[in-house]
Amino acid sequence: MAKETAKLADICRGVLDTANLNDMAGLAMGLMIGDEIFVDSRGFRNYITGDKMKPNDIFHCASISKTFTSTGIMKLVDQKKLDLQDKLVDLLPYLSIADKRCEKVRLHHMLSHISGLQDIEELDWKSAEKGEDSLRKHAISDEVKRVVMNSDPEDFEFMYSDLSYDLLGLIIQEFSGQSFEEFIAENFFKPAGMGDTTFLTFERTAGSLELDNVDKAGMAMPHRRKADGSVVLETVYPYSRQHAPSSTLTSNTVDLLRWARFNLDKKAVSAESYDKMWTERVDAPDKGAEMGMGWFIRNQDGFRLIGHEGGDVGFRTSFWLCPQLDAAMVILSNTSEAPIEPVSENFFSAVVQAL
């Protein structure tokens, strides 16, 4: 093992060894500094069967998905197919949200979670949509028609919205001439070398998202920790194609570090678009960070971190870049209650102390 890789290994193993695995079924972690990477894991892919977690196991990545969707929108802005001042009602004229304040919502509002669009109360994972028209069907559904605006977009108030990102994915589909998944794969997964990453999770599992099929595919299984401290499997796997742009990326530590490298090298979009995505626009106090356009920005130990965290049924995830150190870190857990935030903070502090 090269000297630099050994240093990364020491950092990762030190954080994994001190993480409280009593709070989670399993944990996978990756660190990249420059061109050196190291990945490792602890615990179980399936706690019930005792199948050990491997560093390259596939995870549901939850809201890390939004970094791809926002970057996809900026790709279309670079191509002059979209403008950040475009109005939602002009981009999707068939959208029928009763609250008239929706007519003020512009693309940049949605990217920064300041649109005021109320979030859908509960993402429906039990009836997983798989059709290519899923995003459009969701947009014209009664559930979306009934959405009430939480605020006026001109108030510039941060209110996290999965719905905004699902609609952004539909905009990508409408203005690229490709399905959302095809556009993201062609522009990001393939050039970044992310061969183990997809938004079409059902293709990994023979078309079914039943837990038995997920288990047979060798993917990290979703767990939760009960009040008595015992760890059990969740009852569903979090996937529906209508929520792909906000929530349903599946990937692993190595591929997410490749996504980090692609962005640290600023290969996904123009320099101007990176400046817009990675510049603080609004405070997100409940996230302990500020929001740019689809990417959170936080400061720790004198450094600026850019990335996203996520949480869904059975999973908690964390993905952060540090351009000053040319570094990135990924943390993936397959337990709903996993304490990702303190693990992430400890991870970065360990990186800083080691350098």
Image (cartoon, rainbow, N blue to C red):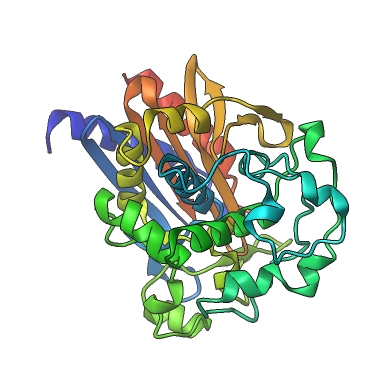
Residue 110 visible somewhere in the drawing: yes
The spot of residue 210 in percent (x, y) is 52, 83
Q: Nearer the viewer, residue 91 or 262?
A: 91
**Residue nearer the viewer, 236 or 108:** 108
| 321 lies above or below 171 | above
Q: Is residue 99 above or below residue 134?
A: above
The image shows residue 185 at horizontal and vertical percentages of: 35, 60
Above or below, comparing residue 91 to residue 345 in the picture:
below
In percent of the image, x 79 and y 70: which residue is there? 143
List the single residue furthest toward the left. Answer: 2
Query: Residue 57: x, y in percent?
Result: 35, 62
Q: Residue at x 50, y 76 (%)?
A: 132
Q: Residue at x 46, y 24 (%)?
A: 349
Q: Which image quadrant: the C terminus?
A: top left
Determine whether, in the image, residue 285 is placed left or right of residue 167.
right
Quarter of the image where the N terminus is located? top left
In front of the other: 84 or 72:
84
As drawn, is 253 to the left or to the right of 136? left
Residue 55 visible in the shown view: no
Residue 126, by quadrant, is bottom right
Q: Quadrant of residue 259?
A: top left
Q: Which residue is nearer to you in this view: 318 or 48?
A: 318
Q: Residue furthest top?
A: 302
Q: Position of residue 353 (x, y in %)?
A: 38, 19
Q: Quadrant of residue 58?
A: bottom left
